[in-house]
Image: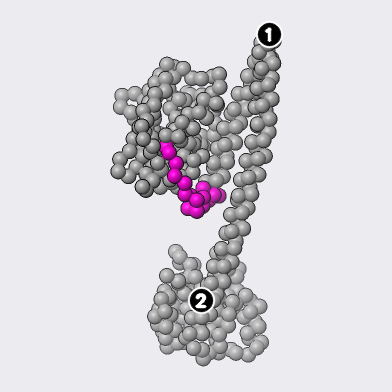
Amino acid sequence: MTRVLLVEDTFDLLANVSQELELNGYEVEQAANGRMALDLLEKAETLPDIIVSDIDMPQVNGYELLATCQRHREWRGIPFIFLTALGDRKDVLVGKKLGADDYLVKPFRSDELIISIKNKLRRVEQIRTTAEQKLDKTRRDLLTMISHELRTPLSAIYGGSELLADSLAKVSDPMSRRMLDLVQSGAKRMRRLVEQIIFLTQLDSGSLANSLEKFPEIQDMQLMINSAYKSLEEEWGSDVPAISIHFQLPSEPVTVVGNPDFLAMMVQEGLRNAVTFSPQNGQIEITLTTDDQYAFVTITDQGPGIAAEDLPKVWERFMQINRGKFEQQGMGLGLALARESARLHHGECFLEPAGGQGMRFTLQMPLAST
């Protein structure tokens, strides 16, 4: 409901205009002068959508009220309409120079005020929509630039190092081999950081939320799991961890609505976390199940587990548990990105003890409507 702050020192007019506005569906807050209006603005949990004010009032008049609003960062965007008996052209110019959006001279008809309010609010909404569209375009352009400018040099490093590795395979030069391994390891680490920065930017900019709302896509979670595992295999390269990974997937497709890159990332982060904390020759189980409403991707490891008091912290950005004990490369964003992305997909992520030893990561996603 549109909220109107009505400021008028004549009691009968204040009551009559308030009643007329309420009959037309507006929520009205009353103030007998500018001082009372400023007090209401200071204490308001929700600011009014528009201010309608008399000019000639005791304590703080309408001009002073408008000038104060214009100086206040949070109030200056509220549309402001003057209602006054001061109909002289000079008085009207004073109000407009201060920034008033409209100026109605008493006596006025109630429909004139309603039309003025609707017009001002419609114009504010148009300006806001235009600004959001421009901001959305800026965000998209920024994401495109980041993706290109960060990924392109990394692609060159990857391609060049692979060619160099092929050449060194025929040459007995251990030192060069070690140096090349360092380059490739650094490139892999940098690529992961770049991907996380891009995912984080898409989350915080609202790009993911907008794409999910405007362009919903049906995805098969089995394909998302395979994509996540393939990406990790490419990341590991020759450094494949000595861990057995077992898949239990249904024979039929399990479909959800979502962004494929983010869905694969959520699974990948859960699997990466399991691999990071699994012991040598350990085992990881990946299952995909459903109930009447949700798909569940469950990843269970045999690692040392996480203390109960530390479990809430794993979802925080830039948080790494027991970094001094376990070698964990990265910024501590993986699980935070997974949960925040899941919630934008109307799903959820969980991490809990697996019973005995190890942890169980669960990604819960709503099933696509059939």
Identify the residue under disc 2.
118
Displayed quadrant of residue 151: top right
Q: Quadrant of the N terminus?
A: bottom left
Image spot of residue 260 (x, y percent): 49, 40
Label at residue 281? none
Q: Residues within 10 Å of mark 2 (few under 14, many from 20)?
A: few
Image spot of residue 226 (x, y percent): 46, 31
User: Quick check: 363 left or right of 183?
Assistant: left
Name the residue at 39% across, 80% down: 23
* Residue 285 belongs to the span the image colors magenta: no
- Say above or below: 316 vs 124: above
Name the residue at 58% across, 54% down: 136
Image spot of residue 224 (x, y percent): 46, 35
Name the residue at 51% across, 34% down: 332
Displayed quadrant of residue 234: top right
What kind of residue is marked 2? Lys
Give the CA separation, mark 1 to mark 2: 80 Å
Nearer mark to the viewer, of 1 and 2: 1
Q: Secondary structure at mark 1?
A: loop
Label at residue 172? 1
Image spot of residue 49 (x, y percent): 49, 70
Residue 110 in view here: yes
- What span is colored magenta in the figure? 205-221
